[in-house]
Image (tube, grey):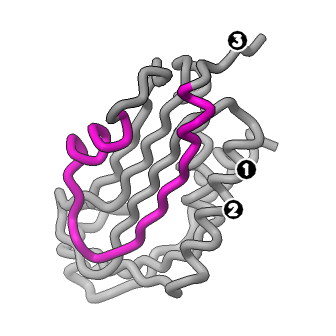
């Protein structure tokens, strides 16, 4: 059963989506999202990071490509779906594109709500759908050369559980 949402929470209700090459400061992003809203009782976040190993191979770099405009529209649709499922205050999605090295941050998803359950669920949903529905293409540089990264069956299975 959902509890009533604080009036200040209803007034906020923003979704912010940014796709760019520059790195992001997680602390600054979360602080800006929370600033001045006493209705926020929960903040859930996810940070995706570039690894140095994938499918058993060393990865020297990752290049993420996308179609500007199309990508933001797909992310907005995913955020709208999360809003339709849970009582959320704010959604922030920051996704980097371009060249990244192992340990670089790739994606940040932050969800605020009055209660933790909505924030946790929506954050996980957003990432599951982002991995399967957002138009990003990944190319890895390995010792054997460059290769495009295929979609994973595990990502599809994770997204399917929300149906």
Measured along the vertical axis of the image, is residue 1 above or below residue 145?
Answer: above
Q: Residue 115 — which label?
A: none
Answer whether labels 3 and 2 touch (C-beta < 8 Å): no
Asked which quadrant contains residue 20, the reply is bottom left
Spot occupied by residue 141 in the image (x, y as percentages of width and height): 26, 81
Q: Nearer the viewer, residue 122 or 99?
A: 122
> Label 3 neighbourhood size at 10 Å, few (<14), some (14-19), many (20+)?
few
Which residue carries the number 3 mark? 3
Q: Secondary structure at mark 3?
A: loop
Whole-Å distance between the Cαs marked 1 and 2?
6 Å
Magenta span contains residue 16: yes
> Label 1 neighbourhood size at 10 Å, few (<14), some (14-19), many (20+)?
some
Q: Nearer the viewer, residue 94 or 46?
A: 94
Whole-Å distance between the Cαs marked 3 and 1?
20 Å
Q: Nearer the viewer, residue 84 or 47?
A: 84
Q: Residue 77 — which label?
A: 2
Q: Residue at x 65, y 20 (%)?
A: 5
Spot occupied by residue 155 in the image (x, y as percentages of width and height): 59, 53
Numbered disc in front, either 3 or 2: 3
Q: Residue at x 38, y 81 (%)?
A: 139
Numbered disc in front, either 3 or 1: 3
Answer whether labels 1 and 2 touch (C-beta < 8 Å): yes
Magenta span contains residue 42: no
Which residue carries the number 1 mark? 81
Q: Residue at x 58, y 42 (%)?
A: 13
Q: Could you tell whether 156 is left or right of 115 in the image?
A: right
Q: Residue at x 49, y 22 (%)?
A: 39
Which segment did they paint magenta?
8-34
Which badge, 3 or 1, comes first in the chain's sequence?
3
Spot occupied by residue 122 in the image (x, y as percentages of width and height): 60, 37
Which badge, 3 or 2, comes first in the chain's sequence?
3
Q: Secondary structure at mark 1?
A: helix
């Amino acid at each position: 059963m959902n509890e009533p949402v604080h009036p200040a929470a209803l007034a906020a209700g923003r979704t912010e989506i940014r796709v760019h090459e520059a790195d992001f400061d997680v602390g600054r992003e979360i602080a800006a999202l929370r600033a001045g809203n006493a209705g926020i009782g929960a903040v859930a976040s996810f940070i995706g990071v570039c690894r140095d190993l994938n499918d058993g191979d060393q990865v020297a770099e990752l290049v993420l490509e996308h179609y500007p405009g199309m990508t933001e529209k797909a992310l907005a649709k995913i955020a709208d779906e999360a809003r339709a499922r849970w009582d959320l205050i704010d959604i922030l999605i920051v996704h980097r594109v371009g060249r990244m090295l192992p340990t670089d941050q790739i994606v940040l998803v932050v969800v605020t709500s009055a209660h933790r359950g909505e924030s946790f669920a929506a954050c996980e949903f957003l990432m599951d759908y982002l991995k399967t529905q957002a138009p990003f293409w990944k190319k890895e540089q390995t010792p054997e050369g460059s290769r495009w990264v295929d979609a994973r069956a595990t990502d599809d299975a994770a997204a399917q559980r929300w149906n």
